[in-house]
Image: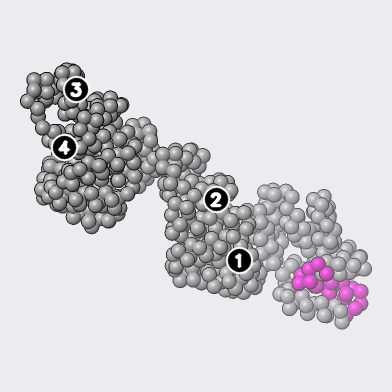
Amino acid sequence: MSTKSLKYIFPFLALISTAIPVIAQSYMEEGYKNVLNGQIDEAIDAYTQEIQLNLLNDNAYYERAKLYIHKGELDSAEQDVKMGLTIDAVKPVGYSLMGYIYLNKGEYQKAEKEFTTAIEQDSSFVTAYVFRAETYGNIFQYEKAIKDYTKVVELSPSSAMYYQRRGHTYMKMKRYEEALSDFNKTIALDTRIIDAYIFKAEINTMQNQFEDALETVEQGLKIDKNNIKLLSLKGDCLSNSIQFSEALEAYNQALLYNPNYAYAYCRRGELYARLQKNTEALNDYNQAIKWAPTYGFAYYKRGVLLTKSRKYLEALNDYDSALKYFPTYYNALVEKGKTELALGRLDESMISLNKAIEVDPTKAYTYVLMGNAYLGKKEYVLAKDFFTEAIENSNNYGYAYMQRGFAYKLSEELDSALTDLDVAVSLMKNNSKVYSYLGDVYSLKGNLEEAQVNYSKALEITPQFSYVIHQRAWTSIKLKNYEYALEDFSLLHNLGKSKYVDLYGEGVALMELGDLTKSNEILQNAIQKYPDYSSARILLGYNYALLGDNDLAEQHIDGVLKLDASPEEVNGVRGIIAFNKKDYKKALKYLNSALKNNPKDKKLYYYRSLTFTKLGKAKKALDDKSKAVALGYKTSTFPAGSELK
């Protein structure tokens, strides 16, 4: 074991040496002198010679044990302490040394036992209390650690470092006010303890008290102007205070003093990402990971950056790396789940999100993401359950109400959908998506005017929301507001978002306005985008039949039938073609069949009224013409002549 692996060696040796009396003996004195001169091996040799001369000198064993600890030779140290305790079992320093060895070995239960024995033999043994507290801290028994540190400051009220240690334990317990009190006491007793400034500034930063944090950092830098942790914290404070240039300068200074300081690279990377300098941010995250390969937070932040760049697979690798070192890292679990959701890996996403819920079951956001995953799986009942769980954890969570409303819409529970979406609107009035959902629900309920109102509200917030433009255009067609529909289809063209179905809608609007030539041009474009689009071909057939061009009409009908469309779908066009060809009985047959499938088609009623006229059935002709007009047919809609041929 190397010296670096011993977390507590230097303060421990300083503390423990005062508890052992100096024996006026030549080899012991020689050993002490060698230690003072840094000649560790020579000191070990001196204590070894003392032991050879005096096997019952337990202090020689303890002194040699301390030096073995210094060299990382814990097993040799353990043997020496055991020998010392064999010679004299009532020696608190021996048990404390043994506890210290076990502490560095990570054998915390044994360490606690040894320190406790030392304290039982000497209730004022400060060192034993200190390191038993450290032991408790390592096994997360913070209350016990606080109790021991409190005893220590009672026994040694003027020792600043003990307040600092207790403060750090309070900090781990998130008892920040008590921690700040201890750090202030530390600084009052000894201004040189830099960690007190660091921890105090970290608490100020966590509490968004950036001015206080910056003041603390500046005080610490007066003591140690090159302290890289303080310089990095200075960067954090300035960054959060939107003083970006000064923050960069602080991080740069920290890295100037230590070019391998991973924390400063990571924090500077966050700042670059905030400034949308993604290349620089990525370089800094790479450097942080290079110098600290187990730095889970750096992997996480790089993953977030890659996710924003839609490099989802690389991001997943980084989230997995973060979770390798911190398996219960909530943010990494959530981001991993979101990324898997974006990739359509719904089952994997749900596994990650379930783990996040296990880590922190109070976070409403996780339940919403889980609900979205179930939406993707079309399991609407479970989706609603998770959105409800999110709402129960956060009553004013507008997004959760919106998504539950959307789930109600998908499961056709339209009244419940409206209730949730109205709540969502009250909580987030500037969210275009919630108005989009409301428009869809009103449309499904047949309240087209209210649907239009909500679509328009959505577009006031997000003018280029192509889905809503599409929905409003088609609602305008249903409301027979064809000019408005054309305006929206034109918007989609200008945005480059016009799809074949929008071209078809534009063709319908133009046809209804009587511009059959322009309608046909648009419908041809739709067919070019999607050659198998039978609806566009059927409408082309109608248009050509209305124009009296029977050959082109029949050509498009034949094209539709080749697409495996049913003959009933084209009976209306066939009826108009038959009328144009003056085969009125055939026309009546086709038109009757077509009206069974489309009982609200005004064109078909109108042409059947003409057919009845030709067949001498005036009353039926008048009835059909009345129906056509009631449905919105205008005799001037289509070019005169096609119906007179």
Q: Earlier in the sequence, mark 2 or mark 1?
A: 2
Q: Earlier in the sequence, mark 3 or mark 4?
A: 4
| Residue drawn where x is 9% and y is 29% of the image | 22
Q: In the rendering, at what x and y percent does residue 538 appear?
A: 77, 58
Please state if 417 lies on the left or on the right of 567 as rendered: left
Relative horizontal placement of residue 556, taking residue 526 as reference (left or right): right
* Residue 264 seen by the camera: no
- Judging by the rendered image, the residue that carries numbered circle 1 is 409
Q: Where residue 496 sits: x, y (%)?
A: 56, 51
In space, the residues marked 3 and 1 are separated at their CA atoms by: 87 Å
x, y percent for residue 204: 24, 53
Verify CB contact (< 8 Å) between mark 2 and mark 3: no
Disc 4 crowd rating (10 Å Cα; few below 14, some 14-19, many 20+) is some
At horizontal 26% and vertical 34% (from top left) the residue drawn is 98
- Cα distance in 3D space between marks 2 and 3: 66 Å
Return the residue at label 2: 350
Give the residue number, with chain letter if any, for mark 4: 15
Q: Nearer the viewer, mark 3 or mark 1?
A: 3
Q: Which residues are magenta?
A: 596-618
The kind of residue on which mark 4 rests is Leu
Give the alpha-carbon distance from disc 3 to disc 4, as whole Å: 26 Å
Q: Give the residue drawn at x 61%, y 62%.
A: 381
Q: Secondary structure at mark 2?
A: helix
Q: Is residue 617 magenta?
A: yes
Are there few (<14), some (14-19), or many (20+) residues within 10 Å of tag 2?
Answer: many
C-beta proximity under 8 Å, tags 3 and 1: no
The rendered magenta stretch, by its main secondary structure, is classed as helix
Q: How is the image coloured?
A: one colour
Q: CA distance from mark 1 to mark 4?
A: 70 Å
- Earlier residue among tags 2 and 3: 3
